[in-house]
Amino acid sequence: MDISLQQVGYLYGKDSPFEKRALQGVTATIASGSYTAIIGHTGSGKSTLLMHLNGLLKPSEGSVQIGDTRITANTKAKALKDVRRKVGIVFQFPEHQLFEETVEKDIMFGPLNFGVPEQEARKRAHELIALLGLPEEVAQKSPFDLSGGQMRRVAIAGVLAFKPSVLVLDEPTAGLDPRGRQEIMELFHRLHHQENLTTILVTHSMEDAARYADHLIVMSGGTAVMTGSPKEIFSREEELATYRLGLPRSVQFQRDFERLIGRTLPDMALTEEQLAQAIVRAAAEEGDA
């Protein structure tokens, strides 16, 4: 399901003494089936933009096209129900949104509210428990008796239970240790391919954007200032710096290595693994010379 933003602007507290502009003239396209990362410095408008992607906020100006639904300032709430079923959002610390007495009931809650029969909702819950690598016995446990990582997986299962076409991730690894962050990001990468999702990652991590995304949107000052593939965006180092953004560690190390050997490697290394392979090849070529 394609998503298109056309000249989207948003004002908090519109027409009040506290009016504040958060978005201005945002135009961008997110292709169906893509893995798009939205990156930007704190206050760049990333989180406000995210809430336009399933109608939690309606644009003050411009429009957001989500599949067949066009959202403007005048769109009625009733017209947004189908969008919210198709676009699931995993917010920061999603485990804070858990509330039911058992894991099974928590995962079932959303589908039941959207009219899914109880038997089908329960079936989905147990399928998702397995898909997210949780033991079957957690189904009848309180979500608050689980570890932090397990609670986050239960919360993610609650979003996936809607069977969304689009999954929006708002800093999904916030508060996790390095191992937990890697496990969650790899989980979303696997789900993206297994479930044929359109995935949108809002992140401050250049490493995650480089490793997982095939398309980037750079936000600054409430607007989209750069769009393109990771290689296209991270090749514009000086321009990124003007938006107070750096390079992924692997790309920065590659730049330092290239200065050391006095030549440019043939391709950009977006991950540590790609960089290691490039250095090995370069060393072999130096040895043959």
Image (spheres, grey):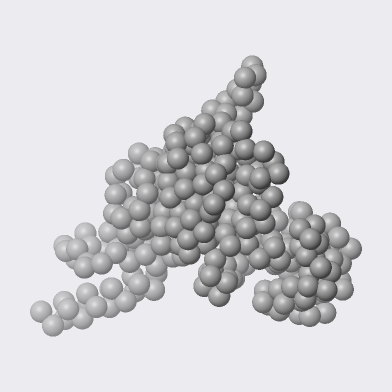
**Residue 261 against residue 169 in the figure, above or below:** below
Identified at 47% across, 61% down, the residue is 32
**Residue 148 against residue 136 in the figure, above or below:** above
- In-image side of 217 versus 165 (left or right): left
Identified at 13% across, 83% down, the residue is 288
- Outermost residue toward the right? 101
Return the x and y of residue 157 as percentages of the image width and height. Answer: 70, 66
Tally of numbered tags: 0
Identified at 16% across, 62% down, the residue is 262
Q: Quadrant of residue 282?
A: bottom left
Return the x and y of residue 266 as percentages of the image width and height. Answer: 21, 68
Return the x and y of residue 162 as percentages of the image width and height. Answer: 69, 63
- In-image side of 189 versus 215 (left or right): right
Between 179 and 21, the one lying in front of the other is 21
- In-image side of 224 versus 169 (left or right): left
User: Is residue 263 visible from the viewing direction of this image?
Assistant: yes
